[in-house]
Image (spheres, rainbow, N blue to C red):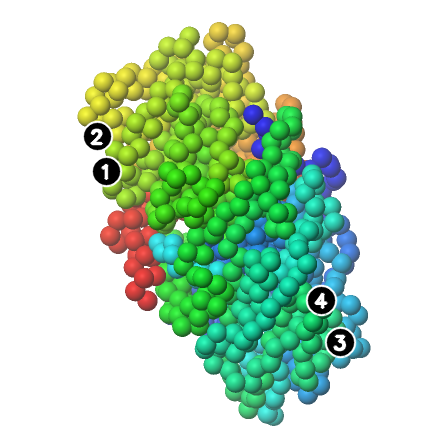
């Protein structure tokens, strides 16, 4: 099969970063410890001023009745063009929800990546343009620290050239600093400047767990809070700028994307403008040739002006009090600005609300608008030609709910107050849950961000087959739009755990029906829906075949357990049985014990850089979990003969696991009894089968005594290899630092997968080592979110180039939202515990629907 990864070939040395040293968890009585004194919220602010930056802390926040826990990222007005400069946060909160694309609002006060106009692969942006400015008495402050960033296509991001265009001396000033707190789908920014009026921005998009339809709304609301901090009356102008359609393309010349141009060749623009729909003062911009439109309008404001985009043009910003740029009739790029006049007495506050609604109903399977649907070669194939996109086009599900951008804008204008209350309400359930550490509650909230940049939901229209029900459509998650673009890889859907079935069972059902529709006569399943952003090009049959039965069966079982719907079981039973029967029979020479073995000729694993054969601990444990699930289904369906057969296979598999793979304090990675070949190393993910058994609520696959010994080596040796405490994927068999063959992807001295550390932490909690599990999880999240700023980046592989924890491959890997299983482990049950009356997720649903 084709390799699924592209990663940097460069082996540049790791630099020393002038950032705060990683600390320990906040202690009781410290300023950032839960239960410590909470700062009062100053009037006109979203959250308190002068909070410590880059660490978790508890504080009051506007709209929340109880304290919240979050990280304040502080972006200062300074810049240095050095290789070691990294933006922090690397990416801001993506505004958007399910199938809407994401418009990132950065910690520097600029727009970052953008896929709202279907720039999916590679993700559009970074736009590197500010959105807000304020004019007072002839002086203008553009509310950005002017930090740009370069595109992070495969690996480490760096700061870009500052786009200030010599604003100093031109009557335009920047923000001195920005305090940034993200809690998806909300981004709160507090600007510090020399202006006599202080400014805060709360930007948010509709995302309600459990409500896929409301979350399928392509728009955002920007709430600007102004406060006159001077002793005299202040009258001025607030300006908002939004780039045109075409400027959302990827903003780097060289992205490593093969034959795909960085700048799409769109038709000549024919932009039409008209007034915003009722209830809004602003403009409606549309280009029918591009199939794109948006509305930008202010709510309940009378003194509103509109004009062309302001971009990074100092003279245009300098003039915002007098006028906005005229729209050129011969070269309208679709950009727009909006200005609202205001007047404030001393200490008076005002809120200005701006709605941005977008509508781009069709996307192209190659993930790149403006290509006319042409076929483009898929560059992630390292094993030969012939892996191309099909040139098909698909229709967003949101277009079935909203006919145009005007309807989206009207919906947001009418419902913005209730929508924000619902968001705050479901988030408050997490912030106030006494069984969750605050840092974990914050991480669970932000784990939903992946839906904005990665999800698509196609209507049941051509080219989707007639097997698809209109109410279902086809829901998919792109594996990694910035790194490895392909839709709904079967393995990743399993690695993500039951989160989709927990929060959006309708979407999970849609996805599973699409997988089943691609099942072939042998029972094999497609590895993915298609390359890039394809939804109807299933293929790569036989890929990672040893993992495939578990990949499918776990998702089916979670959906059934989450919904309690026996009609679902009946619908999918034969499909599941065909898949397991085929996959569990690929090494007949090993008899019943082949359930824990690779196919006779070897095959692919999740850890695809290591050839494996014979009996395998990782895939074997996962296959045992799938068999336990299928056994339960067989009994439920009255298929007793198959249940007996599975019992025999499970028994034989466990016996072979102990006989051939157990080495006293760890399991061999694999052993082929027919050739004598074996791979003896301490493989940190070796107990993944046990993790999946716990979270699913099925019988455990490894003996308790063995699990205890493996975890002891993990705690006492493997987690001490790194100064950061992160367990690498591989170490020597005695738990010492790895000395075998290495690469920059999955195997090396310090390399770990972020999600694997999360799973080891959760498994430890399940197995009775709560303190160790929570400590490891906190250290991992603190390293990624506080130190490196990866909160909204979903990194995959880390530390390939040294013991730093810095990303070495992979962005937006949404299987990291499996962190939600930590909540189940802390609740003392499998994932369904969270769905029970009074459970955490059940409480979130109630809060989000009734607020």
Asked if labels 1 and 2 touch by Cβ distance under 8 angstroms, the answer is yes
Compute the Cα span from label 2 to label 1.
9 Å
For mark 1, does the 10 Å Cα neighbourhood hold few (<14), some (14 to 19), or many (20 or more) residues?
A: few
Identify the residue under disc 1: 566
Compute the Cα span from label 4 to label 1.
59 Å
Residue 825 seen by the camera: no
Q: In this view, does 300 lie to the left or right of 744?
A: left
Identify the residue under disc 4: 331
Residue 414 seen by the camera: yes
Asked if labels 2 and 3 touch by Cβ distance under 8 angstroms, the answer is no
- SS category of the residue bearing label 1: helix
For mark 4, does the 10 Å Cα neighbourhood hold few (<14), some (14 to 19), or many (20 or more) residues?
A: few
Q: In this view, does 179 lie to the left or right of 141?
A: left
Identify the residue under disc 2: 636
Identify the residue under disc 3: 315
Q: Is residue 365 left or right of residue 318?
A: left
**Which quarter of the figure is the N terminus placed in?**
top right
Asked if labels 1 and 4 touch by Cβ distance under 8 angstroms, the answer is no
- SS category of the residue bearing label 3: helix
In terms of sequence position, does the residue under pointer 4 or pointer 2 come before the other? 4
- Quadrant position of residue 129: bottom right
In terms of sequence position, does the residue under pointer 1 or pointer 3 come before the other? 3
In terms of sequence position, does the residue under pointer 3 or pointer 4 come before the other? 3
- Quadrant position of residue 347: bottom right
Q: Mark 3 or mark 2: which is in front?
A: 3
Asked if labels 2 and 4 touch by Cβ distance under 8 angstroms, the answer is no
Where residue 231 appears, x then y in whole percent? 60, 91
Compute the Cα span from label 3 to label 2.
72 Å
Q: Is residue 85 above or below residue 593?
A: below
In terms of sequence position, does the residue under pointer 4 or pointer 1 come before the other? 4
């Amino acid at each position: 099969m084709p390799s699924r990864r592209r990663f940097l070939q460069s082996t540049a040395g790791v630099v020393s970063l002038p950032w705060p040293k990683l600390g320990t968890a906040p202690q009781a009585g410290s300023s950032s410890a839960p239960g410590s004194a909470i700062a009062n919220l100053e009037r006109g602010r979203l959250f308190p001023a002068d909070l410590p930056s880059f660490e978790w802390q508890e504080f009051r926040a506007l709209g929340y009745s109880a304290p919240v826990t979050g990280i304040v990222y502080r972006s200062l007005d300074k810049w240095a063009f050095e290789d070691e400069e990294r933006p922090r946060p690397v990416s801001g909160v993506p505004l958007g929800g399910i199938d809407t694309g994401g418009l990132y609002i950065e910690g520097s006060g600029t727009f970052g990546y953008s896929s709202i106009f279907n720039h999916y692969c590679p993700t559009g942006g970074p736009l590197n343009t500010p959105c807000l400015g304020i004019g007072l008495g002839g002086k203008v402050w553009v509310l950005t620290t002017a930090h740009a960033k370069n595109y992070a296509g495969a690996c480490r991001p760096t700061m870009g050239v500052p786009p200030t265009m010599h604003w100093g001396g031109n009557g335009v000033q920047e923000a001195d600093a920005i305090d940034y707190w993200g809690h998806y789908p909300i981004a709160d920014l507090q600007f510090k400047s020399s202006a006599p009026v202080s400014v805060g921005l709360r930007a948010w998009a509709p995302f309600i767990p459990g409500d896929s339809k409301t979350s399928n709304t392509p728009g955002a609301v920007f709430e600007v809070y102004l406060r006159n901090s001077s002793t005299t009356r202040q009258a001025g102008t607030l300006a908002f700028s939004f780039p045109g359609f075409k400027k959302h393309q990827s903003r780097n010349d060289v992205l490593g994307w093969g034959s795909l141009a960085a700048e799409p060749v769109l038709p000549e623009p024919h932009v039409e403008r008209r007034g915003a729909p009722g209830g809004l003062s602003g403009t409606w911009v549309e280009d029918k040739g591009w199939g794109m439109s948006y509305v930008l309008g202010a709510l309940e404001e009378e003194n509103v002006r509109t004009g062309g985009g302001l971009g990074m043009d100092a003279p245009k910003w300098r003039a915002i009090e007098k006028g906005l740029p005229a729209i050129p009739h011969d070269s309208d790029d679709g950009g727009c600005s909006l200005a609202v006049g205001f007047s404030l007495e001393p200490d008076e506050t005002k809120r200005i609300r701006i709605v941005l609604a977008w509508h781009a109903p069709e996307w192209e399977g190659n993930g790149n608008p403006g290509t006319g649907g042409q076929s483009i070669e898929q560059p992630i194939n390292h094993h030969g030609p012939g892996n191309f996109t099909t040139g098909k086009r698909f229709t967003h599900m949101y277009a079935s709910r909203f006919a145009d951008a005007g309807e989206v804008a009207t919906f947001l204008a009418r419902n913005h107050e209730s929508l924000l209350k619902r968001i705050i309400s479901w988030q408050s359930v997490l912030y106030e849950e006494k069984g969750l550490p605050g840092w974990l509650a914050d991480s669970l909230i932000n784990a939903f961000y992946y839906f904005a940049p990665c999800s698509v939901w196609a209507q049941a229209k051509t080219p989707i087959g007639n097997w698809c029900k209109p109410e279902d459509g086809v829901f998919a998650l792109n594996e990694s739009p910035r790194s490895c673009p392909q839709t709904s890889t079967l393995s990743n859907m399993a690695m993500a755990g039951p989160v989709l079935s927990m929060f959006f069972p309708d979407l999970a059902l849609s996805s599973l029906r699409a997988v089943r529709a691609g099942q072939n006569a042998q029972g094999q399943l497609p590895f993915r829906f298609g390359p890039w952003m394809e939804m109807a090009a299933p293929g790569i049959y036989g890929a990672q075949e040893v993992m495939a039965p578990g990949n499918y069966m776990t998702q089916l079982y979670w959906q059934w357990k989450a919904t309690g719907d026996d009609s679902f079981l009946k619908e999918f039973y034969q499909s599941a049985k065909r898949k397991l029967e085929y996959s569990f029979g690929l090494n007949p020479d090993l008899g019943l014990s082949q359930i824990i073995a690779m196919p006779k000729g070897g095959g692919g694993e999740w850890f695809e850089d290591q050839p494996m054969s014979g009996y395998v601990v990782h895939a074997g444990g996962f296959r045992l979990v799938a068999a336990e699930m299928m056994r339960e289904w067989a009994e439920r369906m009255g298929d007793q003969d198959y249940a007996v057969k599975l019992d025999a296979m499970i028994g034989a598999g466990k016996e072979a696991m102990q006989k051939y793979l157990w080495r006293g304090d760890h399991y061999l990675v694999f052993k082929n009894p027919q050739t004598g070949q074996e791979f003896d190393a301490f493989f940190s993910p070796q107990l993944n089968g046990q993790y999946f058994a716990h979270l699913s609520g099925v019988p455990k696959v490894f003996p308790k005594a063995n699990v205890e010994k493996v975890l002891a080596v993990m705690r006492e040796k493997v987690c001490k290899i790194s100064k950061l405490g992160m367990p690498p994927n591989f170490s020597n068999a005695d738990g010492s630092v790895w000395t075998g063959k290495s690469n920059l992807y999955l195997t090396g001295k310090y390399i770990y997968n972020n999600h694997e550390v999360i799973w080891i932490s959760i498994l430890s909690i399940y197995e009775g080592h709560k303190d160790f599990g929570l400590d490891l999880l906190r250290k991992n999240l603190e390293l990624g979110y506080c130190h490196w700023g990866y909160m909204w980046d979903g990194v995959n592989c880390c530390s390939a180039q040294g013991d730093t924890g810095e990303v070495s491959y992979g962005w937006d890997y949404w299987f990291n939202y499996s962190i939600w299983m930590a909540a189940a482990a802390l609740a003392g049950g499998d994932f369904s515990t969270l769905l029970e009356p009074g459970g955490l997720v059940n409480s979130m649903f109630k809060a989000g629907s009734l607020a």
